[in-house]
Image (cartoon, coloured by chain):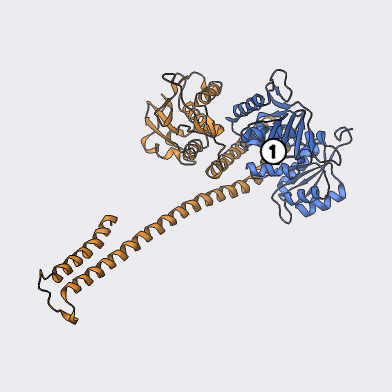
Amino acid sequence: MKRWLWVALMVVPLACGGMGAVLFWLDVLPNRIAYLRIDLGTLFLLLGLMTGSVMLGEALRRVVEERRQRVFLQRMQAEMVNERHEFLRRLDHELKNPLMAMRAGLANLTGTELDAPQREIIESVETQILRLSRLLADLRKLAELEIRPLDCAPVDVNELLQDVLTMTEERPEAEGRQITLTLPQAPWPLPPVSGDHDLLFLLVHNLLDNALKFTRPGDKIELRAFEDGARVVVEVADTGAGIPEKDALLVWNELYRGENARGVPGSGIGLSLVRAIAERHHGEVFLRSRLGQGTVFTLRLPVYRK
Amino acid sequence: MSKLETSSPRLLLVDDEVAITANLASFLERAGFQVSTAQDGVQAIEQMKRIQPDLVILDVLMPRMDGRQVLRQLRQGGDWTPIILLTQVGEASERAMALEEGADDYINKPFDPRELIARIRSVLRRARPGQPPLAAAWKLICGRLVFDRRARRVFLGEQELTLTPKAVALLEYLMTHPDELITRERLLETVWGWDYPVGTRTVDTRIAELRRELGDDAVTPTYIETVPGEGYRFAGKVEGQA
C-alpha cells in the first residue's frame, strides 16, 4: 500500500476522535455518560487515539520492513558480485594449471621429429589451448572490472577515438570496409570525459571489433561522437548483418552467442566488457539494430567536471 | 663471467602439479639447462641447500609452504638466488608484491614455455651473485632520474614528475629490467595483466607519456629506447638502493 494512504489511515481516526471529543465536550452533541462511566467525548478521543496508534504502528512496521528488505537486497547484490568474482577467480586458478601443463607438453612435442600431418594436429591443439586461455583471461578481466579501482583522469575523447580508428584501419579484417570518423569542431570540440583511458580504449575497440566481424567488404562503418550538454555520446554504426530482435537484449550477456554470431570468431565476452566498462564510468550503452540493414551502438559518458 | 657462459645453468623448478614440472623440466633440459624439481615450498628449501641452483622457478600457490613464503624466507636469510615467480592471479597488487618481496621476475600462468626460457636467460644475465636484484631495491637511480618505490614517486633532478599510476608501474618494470628488450605484449601482460590485442597501442600511449614527462627524445633517448617492430628497452644504467 502507498505510504500516503497509511498516513491518511493514521490521521483520519485521530482527527475524527479529536473532533468528536470537542463536539461532545462543547455540548454541541448531548454528552451522556456511556458504558464504564466514560463520556462519549472521551470515548471518541480514546477510540481515535487507539485506531491512530494501531495504524501508526503498522505504518512504522512497514517502513522498517521496507528498509530491511532494501538493505537485504543490496547485501545480496554485493554478495552475488563477490561470489561471482570468487567463482571466476577459482575457475581461473583451476583451469590455469591444466592449460599450463598442456602448453608445456605441446612445447615438448614441437621439439621432436614430426611429419606434416602430426605438426598440423599439434598446431590445431595449440590454437585451441590459446583460445581457452584467452577466454579465461577475458572472464577474469570481467570479474576484475567489477571491483578494481579505476585509474581515473580526464580523457581526451577526440584523441582516443582517432587512436582506436587508426588501429582498426590497420587490421587485415578492415579491408574493404569504409570506416569514417566524425568529430564535432563547432562551436567547440568534444569535452573530455572522466575515466580510465585504457578501459575506454578497450570499450571503443570492442565496439569497432564487433562492427568488423558483422560487416563484409563494401559495408560502411561510422564512428561518430557529439556532446549533449552533460554527456559525450559516441556511436559506432555499421551497415552489416544486424542483430535479430530476440538477441538484441541478450548479446550483452557473458558467453552469449547470437544466431548471427555462429561461425564468427569470438568468445562472447566483448560486449559484456563494453557494458561493464560503461557502467563503471557511470555511463550507459545500448543498441538499435535492423536485420539486414545494420546496427548502431550508442555510448553515453558523463562529461569531465573539475 | 656470466652464468650463461659457464656450463649449463642449474635450475630448480617448483610446482605442485606434476604434469607441469614433468613437461617443463624436459623442455628446459632440451634448451640446455640442468633441471631439478620440487613439489612444494618445504621441499624447495631442502633442494636449494643441496643443489645450490643458479635460478629458481617458483610457483606461488602450493601446499605446505607457498611460493611467497619461500621467497620471503630466502630473502630474509640473505639468499639472493635469482627467482622467477609463476604467478596465478593476474591482478596488479599480486604483481607489485612479487617484485617488492624480492622476486627477480614473474610470469603469469599459462605462459608460453619459450617465453620462460627468454626470461630465465635475461634474469641470469642480470644476476649479480650474492647481491639483491634491482627488483628488491627501494630506490632506483638512473642519472637524474630517481624512482622512490616505497612512496611511488618519481623525481627528475629536484622536480617531482606527475605520472598516472600505470605510467609509474611501467617505468618501474622498465627500470628493474634495464638493457633488456621487452616486447609490448610482455609489458601488457606484466604491467597491465592483460593479453589483449588492443593493448599494444595502449603501451605506446603510456611510453609517450613517460617520454614527455622525462623530457626524453625517442630518436636519441637517454632512458627509453624503441626497438622498431619489437618493443622497448631501458637504455640508462640503473643503480639500486636499499
Q: Amino acid at mark 1?
A: Leu
* Residue depicted at 73% across the width and 25% down the height: B223
Which of the 4 quarters of the picture holds residue B97? top right
* Number of numbered discs overlaid on the protein picture: 1
Q: Does A32 appear above or below B233?
A: below
Q: Percent x, y for residue B49? A: 86, 50
Q: Does A57 appear above or below A281?
A: below
* Residue depicted at 37% across the width and 27% down the height: A292
Closest to the observer, B116 or B158:
B158
Which chain identifier belongs to the blue chain?
A: B
In the figure, the shade used to draw chain A is orange
Quarter of the image with the N terminus of chain A is: bottom left
* Residue depicted at 81% across the width and 52% down the height: B45
Q: Does A197 appear above or below A95?
A: above
Label 1, residues with CA under 10 Å away: few <14, some 14-19, many ≥20: some
Q: Percent x, y for residue A101? A: 69, 44
- Chain under callout 1: A
**Relative to B114, A172 lies left or right:** left
Identify the residue position indicated by label 1 in the image: A106
Closest to the observer, A156 or A216:
A156
**Relative to A276, A244 lies left or right:** left
**Relative to A23, A93 lies left or right:** right
Q: Residue furthest front?
A: A26
Q: Percent x, y for residue B211? A: 66, 25
Q: Percent x, y for residue B222? A: 74, 23
Residue A122 visible here: no
Residue B135 visible here: yes
**What secondary structure is marked by label 1?**
helix
